[in-house]
Structures are given as C-alpha cells and as structure tokens.
C-alpha cells in the first residue's frame, strides 16, 4: 500500500493518523485512512454517500478516548477515490454490489496493517446498506453499530413509483449519468442553510462539514446520478427480503430523521435477534455529529456495545 494524503488540518483526529491508496478488484483506486491502534480493538467505519475519511476524524478521536482505533474508506466515486464520471461531482456506481469490492479492499488493508482485533463495524447511512450486505456475506466482525442505515430511502409514497420508472428509463436511454431529480453538483452543507438542514442540529458541526470541502474542494461530491438512485432502490429492496445476520447489533436513529426510511429500520430491528434500537431525541441524520450531549451519548452507547461483545468474542 502506498501512502496517500490525509488532510489532518480538517480532520480533527486524535493524531498519529495515516492514509493509503488501495486497489479494488476491478482496478479502481480507493483511499483508506486510520488513526491510532486501540488496545480494545478496531472500528471499521463505513461512511455514507458524499463522505470521506476526514469526516470521521472527530469520531476517531471519540473512539480513541474509549480504547478503539478506527479505519475508514473513501468509497468508489467519492473522496479521493477514483471518480466514476467525467463530471467528478456526480455520485455514481454501476452496480450497488460493486461497493463490496471496496469492502474487501478495506478489510485487506486492515489485515496488512495488522489492526488490533476484535473488529467492530460502524456503518452510517449508505454505509449501512453496504455494511448489511457485507455482514450477510460473512464480514468478520464481533459486532455492528449502525447509524441511520440506508435500508430504504425516504420518499413520499406517491413519488416512489416515479423514482423507479425514471431511473429505469435513464439507464435505457443512456442518461443514467444525469443527476437525480431535485439534486445538482452542489455540496449540501455548502448550500443548504443551517436552519433547513437535515444532517445535524449542531451549528458548529455543520459549519465544520462546510469548512472541510471549502479547504479541500477535491473532496466535494454533489447529488447522486440516476443510475445510483436506481441501484440504491434495487439493493435496499433486495436486502429487505434477506434475514438479518446472527450478530450483535446496535442501531442509532435520530427522532428527526428525514433522509433514510425510518420505518424500514424499525421493521428490521424489531425482528433482529440480539439487537437494540436506540432513538436519539431531537437527533437528525448525523447522530455522531450532533450536539455535544447527544454525541457523547451515542459514542458511549457504541463503546459499551463493543466492550460487551469484545469480551464475548475473546471468550
């Protein structure tokens, strides 16, 4: 693995971080970044759509304080990973299951770095969709904590058939690279006013998100393509038909969630053995980047969950 840039000036990580270039099985170049080795184990961080390694520097600091190292990945098409379109601001993927090649590359990097076990998965939003597929296919972790997992996309019932038909038609007419309706090349934190944003109720954290891409515009990603939308709809539908893996699961969901389908989350968590759904009162989509009190509660819950199942895996 060759060294890659890690923008510590915007990451707010615990120090001692490093990043590397890794290749997916189809040849696309990805970036992984990790922060200090933890004496209690390692968090595999699966970010959401538009996100990048540096956005989880603050989370790495929180986990480091609780004894856990962290490794995160720039998925294909975002961050410093190879982009999928000539318009590098458009979020795109050919097949949603292609992200599993990125999972495999991340796990291979964690092994080469000999990151301490046990490993625990934290998967946010789109990363929650990718993570659930990876767990079903046998990802070797001791436990998982989801944050607002994208097991469905929040759409008004009347718009759902339209989203399916538009994405289907776009692929067949060669327009699948176009932005999904209502989106553009604009970065959400840099254009949506704080008072109207769906990510966090913490003004300082929201400003930090905007500052990151202001300082390093190469990290910026805009809206999803029509193909991404169709692939996401198809993958979430297919996952809804699969049983949950036999793995201890914690799921964090903000009471003000408006981006992913909260009902899909409640339905799966209600029948996942050994699982727990925790609602964050007043929390929006990014509960790990909420107000200090909410953030502290979220990381404490995750660390307690990992501690309990680290001991169980060791036994």
Image (spheres, helix red, strand yellow):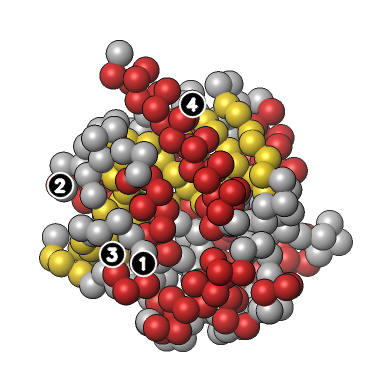
Residue positioned most to the top: 315
Q: Which residue is mark 4?
A: 248
Q: Residues within 10 Å of mark 1 (few under 14, many from 20)?
A: many
Residue linked to disc 3: 31
Q: Percent position (x, y) of residue 221? A: 49, 77
| Residue 178 coordinates in the image, percent (x, y) | 59, 81
**Which of marks 3 and 2 precedes in the sequence?**
3
Q: CA distance from mark 2 to mark 1?
A: 24 Å
**CA distance for labels 1 and 4:** 30 Å
Q: In the image, is residue 195 above or below residue 283?
A: below
Relative to 260, does residue 271 appear above or below in the rendering?
above
First-in-chain label (1 vs 4): 1
Which residue corresponds to mark 2?
A: 112
Residue under the image location 36 percent in, 64 percent down? 12
Q: For the residues labelled 4 and 3, say whether their Cβ atoms are less than 8 Å apart.
A: no
Label 4, label 3: how far apart the Cα atoms are: 28 Å
Circle on res. 230: none
Q: Position of residue 87 (x, y in %)?
A: 46, 86
Q: Nearer the viewer, mark 2 or mark 1?
A: 1
Q: CA distance from mark 4 to mark 2?
A: 26 Å
**Helix, strand or loop at disc 3?**
strand
Q: Quadrant of residue 280?
A: top right
The residue indicated by pointer 1 is: 11
Q: Position of residue 247 (x, y in %)?
A: 47, 26
1 or 4: mark nearer the eye: 1
Query: Left or right: 265 with respect to 303?
Result: right
Asked if 243 appears above or below 185 in the picture, the reply is above
Residue at image location 49% in from the left, 43% down from the top: 299
Q: Are marks 1 and 4 in contact (CB under 8 Å)?
A: no
């Amino acid at each position: 693995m060759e060294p890659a840039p890690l923008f510590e000036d915007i990451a707010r990580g615990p120090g001692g971080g490093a990043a590397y270039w890794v290749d997916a099985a189809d040849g696309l170049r990805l970036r992984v970044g990790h922060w200090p080795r933890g004496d209690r184990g390692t968090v595999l961080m699966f970010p959401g759509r538009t996100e990048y390694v540096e956005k989880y520097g603050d989370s790495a600091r929180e986990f480091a304080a609780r004894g856990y190292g962290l490794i995160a990945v720039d998925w294909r098409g975002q961050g410093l990973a190879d982009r999928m379109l000539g318009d590098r601001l458009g979020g795109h993927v050919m097949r949603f299951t292609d992200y599993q090649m990125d999972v495999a590359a991340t796990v291979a990097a964690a092994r080469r770095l000999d990151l301490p076990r046990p490993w625990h998965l934290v998967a946010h939003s789109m990363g929650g969709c990718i993570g659930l597929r990876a767990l079903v296919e046998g990802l070797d972790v001791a436990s998982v904590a989801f944050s607002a997992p994208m097991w469905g996309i929040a759409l008004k019932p009347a718009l759902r058939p339209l989203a399916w038909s538009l994405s289907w038609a776009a692929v067949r007419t060669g327009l699948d690279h176009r932005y999904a309706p209502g989106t553009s090349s604009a970065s959400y934190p840099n254009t949506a006013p704080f008072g109207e944003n769906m990510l966090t109720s913490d003004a300082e954290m929201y400003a930090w998100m905007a500052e990151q891409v202001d300082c390093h515009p190469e990290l910026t990603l805009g809206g999803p393509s029509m193909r991404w939308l169709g692939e996401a709809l198809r993958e979430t539908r297919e996952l809804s038909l699969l049983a949950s893996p036999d793995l201890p699961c914690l799921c964090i969901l903000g009471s003000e969630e408006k981006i992913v389908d909260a009902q899909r989350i409640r339905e799966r968590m209600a029948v996942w053995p050994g699982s727990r759904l925790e609602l964050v009162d007043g929390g929006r989509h990014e509960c790990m980047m909420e107000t200090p009190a909410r953030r502290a509660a979220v990381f404490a819950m995750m660390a307690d969950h990992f501690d309990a199942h680290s001991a169980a895996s060791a036994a």
